[in-house]
Image (cartoon, rainbow, N blue to C red):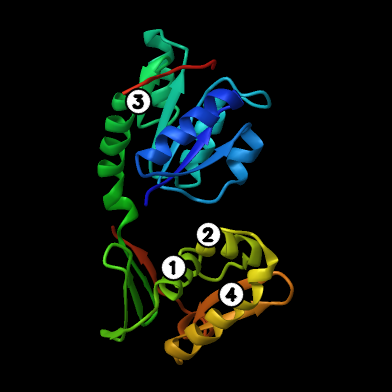
Amino acid sequence: MPRALLVEDDRRFAAALVKALGRCGYEVEHAADAAAALAAPPCDIVLLDLGLPDADGLEVCRRLRERGEVGIIVLTARSTERDRVTGLRAGADDYLVKPFGMAELQARMEAVLRRARPRQDGVLVLGRLTVDLAARTLTLDGSPVKLTPKEFTLLARLIREPGAVVERETLLREVWGTSWQGRSRTLDVHVSTLRAKLGGAARIETAHAVGYRLATTDTTSGGSGDTTSGGGTAGGGG
């Protein structure tokens, strides 16, 4: 299920759009301001209103692009050619003026996702490990390693930032869809089984009371390998 981030300060409009997108098969997180948008976990596509209460929407667009969001569509009432050009130059993949039809929005989202997928569904290589995000497979020294769906999602999240500590709350939210600390034991169990399957090819290290980080044996001995290849009408302010 594609994950979308809706950045929209009009809560009534946002609630209607979240419901409509859910019927279209999207998992949607809503951020009502720039701070919440920039703190949200990575997603497949961002729907960004420009009229935010705490920051310039164009600057938010630039910052989302810099952090690597794969698809950004601006949804705004600003309709001049200059507005459109400015939004696209700020990093948006598409620009849709309010009010708009849901069928058009869905078609534009699908088009952006098709263009973005080669960047997202790539192959991540770290030391002796190769993770194919599209096929959801792991190989170790060229041999396949069988992982459960949650183990794969957990590894894929850690390998995106090798050497960096990923907080427990972030892993719980992005792998299990919740930040409920009652899941902490589940996270620890999955880390333990994943460690066993990785053997000596990589270490999942514990940052006490904070989270986990992934380090290859190459990284810990002074070198590392890390390469990537890769119906209705809606309206609102902004």
Q: Is residue 137 left or right of residue 192?
A: left
Contact (Cβ within 8 Å) of mark 1 with mark 2: yes
Q: In the rendered image, which residue does mark 4 sit on? A: 187
Q: Is residue 74 above or below residue 157?
A: above
Q: Residues within 10 Å of mark 1 (few under 14, many from 20)?
A: some
Q: Residues within 10 Å of mark 2 (few under 14, many from 20)?
A: some
Q: Earlier in the sequence, mark 1 or mark 3?
A: 3
Residue found 74% across the figure and 73% down from its top: 209
* Residue 129 in sight here: yes
Amino acid marked by disc 1: Thr
Amino acid marked by disc 3: Met
Q: In the rendered image, which residue does mark 1 sit on? A: 153
Q: Earlier in the sequence, mark 2 or mark 4?
A: 2
- Distance between the alpha carbons at the discs numbered 2 and 3: 27 Å
- Distance between the alpha carbons at the discs numbered 2 and 4: 11 Å
Along the line of sight, which residue is nearer the eye, 36 or 57?
Answer: 36
Which SS class for mark 2? helix
Q: Earlier in the sequence, mark 1 or mark 2?
A: 1
- Distance between the alpha carbons at the discs numbered 4 and 1: 12 Å
Q: Residue furthest top?
A: 80
Tell me where residue 176 appears, x and y as whole percent. Answer: 53, 64
Q: In the rendered image, which residue does mark 3 sit on? A: 102
Amino acid marked by disc 4: Leu
